[in-house]
Protein backbone atom coordinates (compact mmCIF):
# COMPACT_ATOMS: atom_id res chain seq x y z
CA UNK A 1 0.00 0.00 0.00
CA UNK A 2 2.86 2.39 0.87
CA UNK A 3 4.29 1.81 -2.58
CA UNK A 4 0.92 2.58 -4.24
CA UNK A 5 0.50 5.73 -2.16
CA UNK A 6 3.89 7.00 -3.22
CA UNK A 7 3.22 6.28 -6.87
CA UNK A 8 -0.01 8.26 -6.94
CA UNK A 9 1.46 11.13 -4.96
CA UNK A 10 4.49 11.26 -7.25
CA UNK A 11 2.27 11.26 -10.30
CA UNK A 12 0.24 14.21 -9.08
CA UNK A 13 3.43 16.10 -8.25
CA UNK A 14 4.67 15.29 -11.74
CA UNK A 15 1.47 16.62 -13.29
CA UNK A 16 1.83 19.94 -11.46
CA UNK A 17 5.54 20.43 -11.92
CA UNK A 18 6.42 18.91 -15.25
CA UNK A 19 3.52 19.28 -17.63
CA UNK A 20 4.62 22.60 -19.04
CA UNK A 21 4.84 21.63 -22.69
CA UNK A 22 2.79 24.38 -24.29
CA UNK A 23 2.56 22.84 -27.70
CA UNK A 24 -0.11 20.33 -26.99
CA UNK A 25 -3.03 19.37 -24.84
CA UNK A 26 -1.81 16.22 -23.18
CA UNK A 27 -5.09 14.50 -23.85
CA UNK A 28 -5.70 11.21 -22.13
CA UNK A 29 -2.78 11.78 -19.78
CA UNK A 30 -4.48 9.11 -17.76
CA UNK A 31 -3.84 9.22 -14.06
CA UNK A 32 -4.69 5.55 -13.99
CA UNK A 33 -7.28 6.04 -11.29
CA UNK A 34 -9.48 3.11 -12.00
CA UNK A 35 -11.08 4.25 -15.22
CA UNK A 36 -11.68 7.95 -14.58
CA UNK A 37 -10.89 9.28 -18.02
CA UNK A 38 -8.90 12.43 -17.44
CA UNK A 39 -7.42 15.06 -19.70
CA UNK A 40 -4.77 17.47 -18.51
CA UNK A 41 -4.64 20.79 -20.30
CA UNK A 42 -1.27 22.51 -20.31
CA UNK A 43 -0.04 25.95 -21.28
CA UNK A 44 -1.97 29.19 -21.73
CA UNK A 45 -3.13 28.67 -25.34
CA UNK A 46 -4.73 25.29 -24.64
CA UNK A 47 -6.28 26.40 -21.33
CA UNK A 48 -7.75 29.49 -23.02
CA UNK A 49 -9.11 27.40 -25.85
CA UNK A 50 -11.01 25.18 -23.39
CA UNK A 51 -12.13 27.72 -20.79
CA UNK A 52 -12.85 30.73 -23.02
CA UNK A 53 -13.48 29.54 -26.58
CA UNK A 54 -15.36 26.43 -25.50
CA UNK A 55 -16.61 27.80 -22.21
CA UNK A 56 -20.06 26.18 -22.56
CA UNK A 57 -18.46 22.71 -22.82
CA UNK A 58 -15.67 22.85 -20.22
CA UNK A 59 -17.97 24.06 -17.47
CA UNK A 60 -19.11 21.00 -15.53
CA UNK A 61 -17.61 19.36 -12.44
CA UNK A 62 -16.71 15.65 -12.46
CA UNK A 63 -18.72 13.08 -10.51
CA UNK A 64 -16.04 11.67 -8.24
CA UNK A 65 -16.87 8.91 -5.76
CA UNK A 66 -15.16 10.92 -3.01
CA UNK A 67 -17.64 13.71 -3.58
CA UNK A 68 -20.61 11.29 -3.45
CA UNK A 69 -19.24 10.17 -0.09
CA UNK A 70 -19.05 13.78 1.07
CA UNK A 71 -22.46 14.44 -0.46
CA UNK A 72 -21.23 17.69 -1.99
CA UNK A 73 -23.67 19.91 -3.84
CA UNK A 74 -24.00 23.65 -3.14
CA UNK A 75 -22.15 25.85 -5.63
CA UNK A 76 -18.48 25.05 -6.08
CA UNK A 77 -18.84 21.31 -6.56
CA UNK A 78 -22.28 21.51 -8.15
CA UNK A 79 -22.89 19.95 -11.57
CA UNK A 80 -23.52 22.53 -14.30
CA UNK A 81 -27.23 23.22 -14.66
CA UNK A 82 -30.06 24.94 -12.86
CA UNK A 83 -28.66 24.29 -9.37
CA UNK A 84 -25.33 25.92 -10.22
CA UNK A 85 -26.97 28.89 -12.02
CA UNK A 86 -29.32 29.57 -9.10
CA UNK A 87 -26.58 29.34 -6.47
CA UNK A 88 -24.02 31.36 -8.44
CA UNK A 89 -26.57 34.13 -9.10
CA UNK A 90 -27.64 34.31 -5.47
CA UNK A 91 -24.05 34.39 -4.20
CA UNK A 92 -22.95 37.05 -6.73
CA UNK A 93 -25.94 39.18 -5.60
CA UNK A 94 -24.98 38.75 -1.95
CA UNK A 95 -21.38 39.80 -2.68
CA UNK A 96 -22.84 42.91 -4.33
CA UNK A 97 -25.22 43.76 -1.46
CA UNK A 98 -23.24 42.69 1.61
CA UNK A 99 -19.65 42.58 0.36
CA UNK A 100 -17.20 44.28 -2.00
CA UNK A 101 -20.07 45.78 -4.01
CA UNK A 102 -20.59 48.27 -1.15
CA UNK A 103 -18.11 51.07 -0.50
CA UNK A 104 -18.73 50.73 3.28
CA UNK A 105 -17.41 47.17 3.12
CA UNK A 106 -13.87 48.53 2.79
CA UNK A 107 -14.20 50.11 6.25
CA UNK A 108 -15.14 46.72 7.68
CA UNK A 109 -12.01 45.18 6.13
CA UNK A 110 -9.98 48.05 7.59
CA UNK A 111 -11.46 47.24 11.03
CA UNK A 112 -10.43 43.59 10.64
CA UNK A 113 -6.94 44.77 9.58
CA UNK A 114 -6.68 46.59 12.92
CA UNK A 115 -7.64 43.46 14.88
CA UNK A 116 -5.07 41.54 12.86
CA UNK A 117 -2.26 44.07 13.36
CA UNK A 118 -2.93 44.32 17.09
CA UNK A 119 -2.81 40.53 17.36
CA UNK A 120 0.53 40.50 15.50
CA UNK A 121 1.77 43.22 17.87
CA UNK A 122 1.18 40.97 20.89
CA UNK A 123 4.26 38.96 19.81
CA UNK A 124 6.38 42.12 20.37
CA UNK A 125 8.76 41.35 17.52
CA UNK A 126 9.33 37.72 18.64
CA UNK A 127 9.07 34.99 15.97
CA UNK A 128 5.61 33.45 15.48
CA UNK A 129 3.71 31.36 12.93
CA UNK A 130 1.28 33.73 11.19
CA UNK A 131 -0.98 30.98 9.84
CA UNK A 132 -3.67 31.05 12.51
CA UNK A 133 -3.94 34.82 12.70
CA UNK A 134 -4.07 35.23 8.92
CA UNK A 135 -6.71 32.48 8.69
CA UNK A 136 -8.86 34.19 11.33
CA UNK A 137 -8.57 37.62 9.76
CA UNK A 138 -9.24 36.44 6.21
CA UNK A 139 -12.15 34.15 7.08
CA UNK A 140 -13.79 36.99 9.01
CA UNK A 141 -14.16 38.99 5.79
CA UNK A 142 -16.18 36.17 4.25
CA UNK A 143 -18.07 35.79 7.53
CA UNK A 144 -19.25 39.40 7.26
CA UNK A 145 -20.99 38.54 3.97
CA UNK A 146 -22.39 35.22 5.15
CA UNK A 147 -23.32 35.98 8.78
CA UNK A 148 -23.08 39.78 8.93
CA UNK A 149 -20.58 39.38 11.80
CA UNK A 150 -16.99 38.49 12.53
CA UNK A 151 -15.83 35.77 14.95
CA UNK A 152 -13.35 36.69 17.67
CA UNK A 153 -9.87 35.18 17.40
CA UNK A 154 -10.42 33.24 20.62
CA UNK A 155 -13.67 31.52 19.52
CA UNK A 156 -12.39 27.98 19.98
CA UNK A 157 -15.38 26.26 18.39
CA UNK A 158 -15.00 28.28 15.19
CA UNK A 159 -11.21 27.75 15.22
CA UNK A 160 -11.72 24.01 15.48
CA UNK A 161 -14.10 24.00 12.50
CA UNK A 162 -11.58 25.94 10.38
CA UNK A 163 -8.79 23.54 11.38
CA UNK A 164 -10.61 20.38 10.37
CA UNK A 165 -11.96 22.06 7.25
CA UNK A 166 -8.42 22.97 6.23
CA UNK A 167 -7.25 19.46 7.04
CA UNK A 168 -9.87 18.18 4.61
CA UNK A 169 -8.41 20.29 1.80
CA UNK A 170 -5.14 18.46 2.31
CA UNK A 171 -6.81 15.07 2.68
CA UNK A 172 -8.80 15.60 -0.53
CA UNK A 173 -5.51 15.51 -2.44
CA UNK A 174 -4.04 12.65 -0.42
CA UNK A 175 -3.19 9.27 -1.86
CA UNK A 176 -6.13 7.78 0.05
CA UNK A 177 -8.55 10.17 -1.63
CA UNK A 178 -7.20 9.21 -5.04
CA UNK A 179 -7.47 5.55 -4.15
CA UNK A 180 -11.03 6.07 -2.97
CA UNK A 181 -11.97 7.66 -6.29
CA UNK A 182 -10.47 4.73 -8.12
CA UNK A 183 -11.79 1.99 -5.85
CA UNK A 184 -14.81 3.30 -3.91
CA UNK A 185 -15.09 -0.05 -2.09
CA UNK A 186 -12.19 1.02 0.13
CA UNK A 187 -14.86 3.13 1.85
CA UNK A 188 -15.79 -0.11 3.57
CA UNK A 189 -12.41 -0.20 5.29
CA UNK A 190 -12.70 1.20 8.82
CA UNK A 191 -9.29 2.94 8.59
CA UNK A 192 -7.55 5.33 6.19
CA UNK A 193 -7.56 9.08 5.55
CA UNK A 194 -10.86 8.94 3.65
CA UNK A 195 -12.59 7.93 6.92
CA UNK A 196 -11.02 10.92 8.66
CA UNK A 197 -12.18 13.11 5.78
CA UNK A 198 -15.79 11.92 6.17
CA UNK A 199 -15.69 12.31 9.95
CA UNK A 200 -14.35 15.87 9.64
CA UNK A 201 -16.99 16.70 7.00
CA UNK A 202 -19.78 15.47 9.30
CA UNK A 203 -18.48 17.61 12.17
CA UNK A 204 -18.26 20.70 9.96
CA UNK A 205 -21.80 20.06 8.70
CA UNK A 206 -23.20 19.92 12.25
CA UNK A 207 -21.34 23.06 13.26
CA UNK A 208 -22.56 24.98 10.18
CA UNK A 209 -26.15 23.88 10.77
CA UNK A 210 -25.94 25.19 14.31
CA UNK A 211 -24.51 28.59 13.40
CA UNK A 212 -26.85 29.02 10.44
CA UNK A 213 -29.77 28.49 12.82
CA UNK A 214 -28.27 30.99 15.24
CA UNK A 215 -27.75 33.70 12.61
CA UNK A 216 -31.21 33.28 11.11
CA UNK A 217 -32.91 34.04 14.42
CA UNK A 218 -34.93 37.30 14.47
CA UNK A 219 -34.93 37.49 10.70
CA UNK A 220 -37.51 39.60 8.87
CA UNK A 221 -38.47 37.88 5.59
CA UNK A 222 -37.61 39.92 2.45
CA UNK A 223 -35.36 42.18 4.48
CA UNK A 224 -32.06 40.29 4.37
CA UNK A 225 -29.12 41.24 6.59
CA UNK A 226 -26.66 38.74 5.09
CA UNK A 227 -26.31 35.74 2.77
CA UNK A 228 -28.16 33.36 5.08
CA UNK A 229 -31.25 35.60 5.18
CA UNK A 230 -31.16 36.01 1.38
CA UNK A 231 -30.93 32.26 0.93
CA UNK A 232 -33.86 31.62 3.27
CA UNK A 233 -35.93 34.19 1.33
CA UNK A 234 -35.21 32.28 -1.90
CA UNK A 235 -35.97 28.97 -0.22
CA UNK A 236 -39.37 30.21 0.95
CA UNK A 237 -40.16 31.84 -2.41
CA UNK A 238 -39.62 28.50 -4.15
CA UNK A 239 -41.38 26.14 -1.73
CA UNK A 240 -43.94 25.13 -4.37
CA UNK A 241 -41.34 24.55 -7.07
CA UNK A 242 -40.53 20.83 -7.00
CA UNK A 243 -37.42 21.36 -9.13
CA UNK A 244 -35.87 24.09 -6.99
CA UNK A 245 -32.27 23.65 -5.90
CA UNK A 246 -32.72 25.89 -2.84
CA UNK A 247 -32.78 23.56 0.15
CA UNK A 248 -31.58 23.74 3.73
CA UNK A 249 -28.93 21.14 2.94
CA UNK A 250 -27.66 23.13 -0.05
CA UNK A 251 -27.50 26.24 2.11
CA UNK A 252 -25.16 24.41 4.47
CA UNK A 253 -22.96 23.20 1.59
CA UNK A 254 -22.87 26.64 -0.02
CA UNK A 255 -21.90 28.37 3.22
CA UNK A 256 -19.18 25.78 3.87
CA UNK A 257 -17.80 26.05 0.34
CA UNK A 258 -17.65 29.84 0.36
CA UNK A 259 -15.92 29.88 3.76
CA UNK A 260 -13.27 27.40 2.73
CA UNK A 261 -12.82 28.65 -0.88
CA UNK A 262 -12.37 32.19 0.42
CA UNK A 263 -10.18 31.37 3.39
CA UNK A 264 -7.77 28.64 2.35
CA UNK A 265 -6.73 30.41 -0.87
CA UNK A 266 -6.37 34.00 0.33
CA UNK A 267 -4.67 32.87 3.56
CA UNK A 268 -2.11 30.88 1.62
CA UNK A 269 -1.49 33.77 -0.77
CA UNK A 270 -0.82 36.11 2.17
CA UNK A 271 1.41 33.56 3.90
CA UNK A 272 3.48 33.23 0.70
CA UNK A 273 3.62 37.04 0.37
CA UNK A 274 4.91 37.36 3.95
CA UNK A 275 7.45 34.61 3.31
CA UNK A 276 8.81 36.18 0.11
CA UNK A 277 9.14 39.72 1.46
CA UNK A 278 10.93 38.37 4.53
CA UNK A 279 13.17 36.35 2.23
CA UNK A 280 13.99 39.29 -0.06
CA UNK A 281 14.65 42.41 2.07
CA UNK A 282 15.25 44.51 -1.07
CA UNK A 283 11.70 43.75 -2.28
CA UNK A 284 10.30 44.48 1.18
CA UNK A 285 12.28 47.75 1.23
CA UNK A 286 10.70 48.89 -2.04
CA UNK A 287 7.19 48.10 -0.74
CA UNK A 288 7.98 50.05 2.46
CA UNK A 289 9.16 53.01 0.37
CA UNK A 290 6.00 52.98 -1.73
CA UNK A 291 3.74 52.76 1.33
CA UNK A 292 5.59 55.63 3.00
CA UNK A 293 5.38 57.79 -0.12
CA UNK A 294 1.74 57.13 -0.98
CA UNK A 295 0.00 56.30 2.31
CA UNK A 296 2.34 57.58 5.01
CA UNK A 297 1.98 56.55 8.65
CA UNK A 298 -1.05 58.61 9.68
CA UNK A 299 -3.82 56.81 7.81
CA UNK A 300 -4.76 53.20 6.94
CA UNK A 301 -4.06 52.05 3.38
CA UNK A 302 -7.24 52.16 1.27
CA UNK A 303 -8.27 51.02 -2.18
CA UNK A 304 -7.89 54.60 -3.40
CA UNK A 305 -4.14 54.19 -2.91
CA UNK A 306 -3.95 51.07 -5.05
CA UNK A 307 -3.52 52.71 -8.45
CA UNK A 308 -0.61 54.76 -7.08
CA UNK A 309 1.19 51.68 -5.76
CA UNK A 310 2.33 49.72 -8.84
CA UNK A 311 5.27 48.03 -7.09
CA UNK A 312 3.13 46.59 -4.30
CA UNK A 313 0.62 45.41 -6.90
CA UNK A 314 3.45 43.80 -8.86
CA UNK A 315 4.68 41.92 -5.76
CA UNK A 316 1.20 40.55 -5.03
CA UNK A 317 0.74 39.50 -8.66
CA UNK A 318 4.12 37.78 -8.70
CA UNK A 319 3.18 35.90 -5.50
CA UNK A 320 -0.01 34.64 -7.17
CA UNK A 321 1.86 33.65 -10.34
CA UNK A 322 4.90 32.08 -8.73
CA UNK A 323 3.22 30.36 -5.79
CA UNK A 324 0.24 28.92 -7.69
CA UNK A 325 -2.29 28.78 -4.88
CA UNK A 326 -4.69 26.55 -6.83
CA UNK A 327 -2.21 24.85 -9.19
CA UNK A 328 -4.74 22.62 -10.94
CA UNK A 329 -7.75 24.93 -10.59
CA UNK A 330 -10.81 22.98 -9.53
CA UNK A 331 -11.39 19.90 -11.65
CA UNK A 332 -13.80 20.45 -14.52
CA UNK A 333 -15.72 18.06 -16.77
CA UNK A 334 -17.10 18.33 -20.30
CA UNK A 335 -20.83 18.68 -21.01
CA UNK A 336 -20.51 17.52 -24.66
CA UNK A 337 -18.07 15.80 -27.00
CA UNK A 338 -15.42 18.27 -28.05
CA UNK A 339 -12.21 18.64 -30.05
CA UNK A 340 -9.27 20.63 -28.79
CA UNK A 341 -6.22 21.05 -31.03
CA UNK A 342 -7.10 17.94 -32.96
CA UNK A 343 -7.67 15.76 -29.88
CA UNK A 344 -11.18 14.51 -29.22
CA UNK A 345 -12.45 14.80 -25.70
CA UNK A 346 -15.68 12.88 -25.08
CA UNK A 347 -18.58 14.18 -23.01
CA UNK A 348 -18.15 13.54 -19.28
CA UNK A 349 -14.33 13.52 -19.36
CA UNK A 350 -12.66 14.94 -16.26
CA UNK A 351 -10.51 17.93 -17.22
CA UNK A 352 -7.62 19.23 -15.14
CA UNK A 353 -6.55 22.74 -16.12
CA UNK A 354 -2.90 22.96 -15.16
CA UNK A 355 -2.74 26.62 -14.11
CA UNK A 356 0.77 25.99 -12.82
CA UNK A 357 1.88 25.25 -16.39
CA UNK A 358 0.27 28.51 -17.57
CA UNK A 359 2.24 30.53 -15.01
CA UNK A 360 5.47 28.84 -16.10
CA UNK A 361 4.66 28.91 -19.84
CA UNK A 362 7.84 30.19 -21.51
CA UNK A 363 5.89 31.51 -24.46
CA UNK A 364 4.39 34.13 -22.12
CA UNK A 365 6.90 34.52 -19.27
CA UNK A 366 10.64 35.03 -19.47
CA UNK A 367 12.63 33.16 -16.82
CA UNK A 368 9.41 31.98 -15.17
CA UNK A 369 11.30 30.07 -12.46
CA UNK A 370 12.61 33.36 -11.01
CA UNK A 371 10.56 35.35 -8.46
CA UNK A 372 10.59 38.78 -10.10
CA UNK A 373 7.85 41.37 -9.38
CA UNK A 374 9.37 43.67 -12.04
CA UNK A 375 7.86 41.48 -14.78
CA UNK A 376 4.56 43.23 -13.96
CA UNK A 377 6.06 46.72 -14.46
CA UNK A 378 6.79 48.66 -17.64
CA UNK A 379 9.91 50.75 -18.25
CA UNK A 380 8.25 53.68 -16.42
CA UNK A 381 7.54 51.55 -13.36
CA UNK A 382 3.82 51.42 -14.14
CA UNK A 383 1.84 48.24 -13.49
CA UNK A 384 1.09 46.13 -16.60
CA UNK A 385 -1.50 43.36 -16.85
CA UNK A 386 -0.36 40.04 -18.28
CA UNK A 387 -2.63 37.91 -20.39
CA UNK A 388 -1.34 34.58 -19.08
CA UNK A 389 -1.94 35.52 -15.44
CA UNK A 390 -4.78 33.19 -14.43
CA UNK A 391 -4.68 32.37 -10.68
CA UNK A 392 -8.47 32.73 -10.54
CA UNK A 393 -8.98 30.58 -13.66
CA UNK A 394 -11.11 31.66 -16.63
CA UNK A 395 -14.55 31.24 -18.17
CA UNK A 396 -18.01 30.84 -16.73
CA UNK A 397 -16.85 29.06 -13.61
CA UNK A 398 -13.91 31.34 -12.84
CA UNK A 399 -13.39 32.26 -9.19
CA UNK A 400 -16.44 33.99 -7.80
CA UNK A 401 -14.38 35.69 -5.08
CA UNK A 402 -11.69 37.19 -7.33
CA UNK A 403 -12.60 40.82 -6.61
CA UNK A 404 -12.85 40.17 -2.88
CA UNK A 405 -9.55 38.27 -2.80
CA UNK A 406 -7.72 41.08 -4.62
CA UNK A 407 -9.10 43.66 -2.17
CA UNK A 408 -8.19 41.56 0.88
CA UNK A 409 -4.68 40.82 -0.36
CA UNK A 410 -3.95 44.49 -1.01
CA UNK A 411 -5.39 45.82 2.25
CA UNK A 412 -3.98 43.16 4.61
CA UNK A 413 -0.54 43.16 2.96
CA UNK A 414 -0.10 46.94 2.88
CA UNK A 415 -1.49 47.37 6.42
CA UNK A 416 0.97 44.75 7.70
CA UNK A 417 3.99 46.29 6.00
CA UNK A 418 2.95 49.82 6.91
CA UNK A 419 3.38 48.92 10.57
CA UNK A 420 6.03 46.16 10.56
CA UNK A 421 9.37 45.09 9.25
CA UNK A 422 9.30 41.32 8.64
CA UNK A 423 12.27 39.01 8.96
CA UNK A 424 13.11 35.41 9.77
CA UNK A 425 14.74 34.51 13.09
CA UNK A 426 18.54 34.71 12.64
CA UNK A 427 20.05 31.57 11.19
CA UNK A 428 16.77 30.06 9.97
CA UNK A 429 16.09 29.28 6.36
CA UNK A 430 12.45 28.67 5.44
CA UNK A 431 11.49 25.72 3.28
CA UNK A 432 10.43 27.20 -0.06
CA UNK A 433 8.83 24.00 -1.33
CA UNK A 434 5.05 24.00 -1.24
CA UNK A 435 2.98 21.51 0.74
CA UNK A 436 0.95 19.57 -1.80
CA UNK A 437 -2.83 19.63 -1.48
CA UNK A 438 -5.78 20.95 -3.49
CA UNK A 439 -4.06 24.28 -2.76
CA UNK A 440 -0.33 24.91 -2.44
CA UNK A 441 0.63 26.31 0.94
CA UNK A 442 4.00 27.02 2.50
CA UNK A 443 5.42 24.66 5.11
CA UNK A 444 5.01 26.17 8.58
CA UNK A 445 7.57 28.90 9.22
CA UNK A 446 8.30 31.48 11.92
CA UNK A 447 8.59 35.16 11.14
CA UNK A 448 9.34 38.16 13.35
CA UNK A 449 7.28 41.34 12.89
CA UNK A 450 9.11 44.33 14.36
CA UNK A 451 7.50 47.75 14.60
CA UNK A 452 9.06 50.06 12.01
C1 LIG B 1 -6.08 34.21 -3.75
C2 LIG B 1 -7.32 33.86 -3.61
C3 LIG B 1 -8.10 32.93 -4.51
C4 LIG B 1 -7.66 32.13 -5.53
C5 LIG B 1 -6.23 31.96 -6.06
C6 LIG B 1 -8.82 31.44 -6.05
C7 LIG B 1 -8.79 30.55 -7.12
C8 LIG B 1 -9.90 29.89 -7.61
C9 LIG B 1 -9.87 28.95 -8.70
C10 LIG B 1 -8.62 28.58 -9.51
C11 LIG B 1 -11.13 28.49 -8.88
C12 LIG B 1 -11.57 27.43 -9.89
C13 LIG B 1 -12.37 27.99 -11.02
C14 LIG B 1 -12.57 26.92 -12.08
O1 LIG B 1 -13.39 26.02 -11.95
O2 LIG B 1 -11.86 26.98 -13.08
C15 LIG B 1 -11.98 29.13 -7.89
C16 LIG B 1 -13.35 28.92 -7.76
C17 LIG B 1 -14.12 29.49 -6.79
N1 LIG B 1 -13.72 30.41 -5.85
FE1 LIG B 1 -11.85 31.19 -5.64
N2 LIG B 1 -9.91 31.81 -5.33
C18 LIG B 1 -9.53 32.73 -4.39
C19 LIG B 1 -10.34 33.39 -3.47
C20 LIG B 1 -11.70 33.20 -3.34
C21 LIG B 1 -12.56 33.92 -2.41
C22 LIG B 1 -12.10 35.05 -1.48
C23 LIG B 1 -13.82 33.38 -2.54
C24 LIG B 1 -15.08 33.74 -1.81
C25 LIG B 1 -15.15 34.25 -0.63
C26 LIG B 1 -13.76 32.36 -3.57
C27 LIG B 1 -14.82 31.61 -3.99
C28 LIG B 1 -14.79 30.72 -5.05
C29 LIG B 1 -15.96 29.95 -5.50
C30 LIG B 1 -17.35 29.99 -4.87
C31 LIG B 1 -15.53 29.19 -6.60
C32 LIG B 1 -16.38 28.21 -7.41
C33 LIG B 1 -17.00 28.91 -8.59
C34 LIG B 1 -17.97 28.02 -9.37
O3 LIG B 1 -17.84 26.80 -9.36
O4 LIG B 1 -18.85 28.59 -10.02
N3 LIG B 1 -12.47 32.27 -4.03
N4 LIG B 1 -11.20 29.98 -7.13
Image: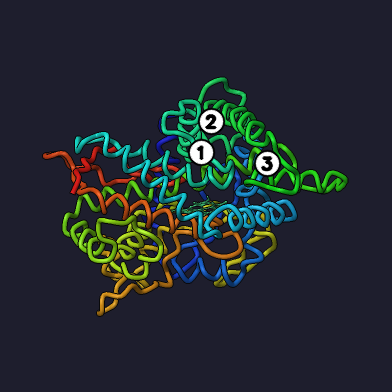
The image shows residue 133 at horizontal and vertical percentages of: 36, 38
Which quarter of the figure is the N terminus placed in? top left
How would you rate the neighbour count of disc 2 (Cα within 10 Å): few for under 14, some for 14-19, many for 20 or more?
many
| Among numbered discs 3 and 2, the one appearing first in the sequence | 2
User: Is ligand 1 closer than 8 angstroms to the Cβ of mark 3?
Assistant: no
424 or 67: nearer the viewer: 424
User: Is ligand 1 closer than 8 angstroms to the Cβ of mark 2?
Assistant: no
Q: In the current view of this chain or complex, which residue is farthest to the right?
A: 240
User: Disc 3 marks which residue?
Assistant: 251
User: Disc 2 marks which residue?
Assistant: 197
The image shows residue 312 at horizontal and vertical percentages of: 30, 62
Q: Could you tell me which secondary element the residue under label 3 belongs to?
A: helix
Q: Could you tell me which secondary element the residue under label 1 belongs to?
A: loop
Question: Mark 1–mark 2 contact, CB under 8 Å?
Answer: yes
**Residue 40 visible in the current orientation:** no
The image shows residue 64 at horizontal and vertical percentages of: 62, 43
Q: In the current view of this chain or complex, which residue is farthest to the top?
A: 190
Q: Nearer the viewer, mark 3 or mark 1?
A: 3
- Give how far apart the Cα atoms at labels 3 and 2 are: 21 Å
User: Disc 1 marks which residue?
Assistant: 172
Q: Residue at x 42, y 45 (%)?
A: 112
Q: From the viewer's perspective, tell me whether residue 423 is left or right of residue 356.
A: left
Q: How is the image coloured?
A: rainbow
Q: From the viewer's perspective, tell me whether residue 326 is left or right of residue 379.
A: right
171 or 107: nearer the viewer: 107
Q: Nearer the viewer, mark 3 or mark 2?
A: 3
Q: From the viewer's perspective, tell me whether residue 227 is left or right of residue 323.
A: right
- Give how far apart the Cα atoms at labels 3 and 1 are: 22 Å
Amino acid sequence: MEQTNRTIHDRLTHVIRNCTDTDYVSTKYTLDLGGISTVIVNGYDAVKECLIRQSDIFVDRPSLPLFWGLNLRGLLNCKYGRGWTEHRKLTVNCFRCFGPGQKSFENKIAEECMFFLDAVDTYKGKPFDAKLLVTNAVSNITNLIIFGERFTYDDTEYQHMMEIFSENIELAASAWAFLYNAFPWIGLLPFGDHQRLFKNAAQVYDFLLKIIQRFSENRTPQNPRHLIDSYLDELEKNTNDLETSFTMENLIFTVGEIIIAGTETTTNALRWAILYVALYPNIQGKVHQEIDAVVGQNQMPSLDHKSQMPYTEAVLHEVLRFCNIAPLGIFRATTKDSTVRGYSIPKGTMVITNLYSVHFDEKYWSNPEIFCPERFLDSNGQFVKKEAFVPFSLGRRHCLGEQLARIELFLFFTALLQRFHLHFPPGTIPNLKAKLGMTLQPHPYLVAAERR
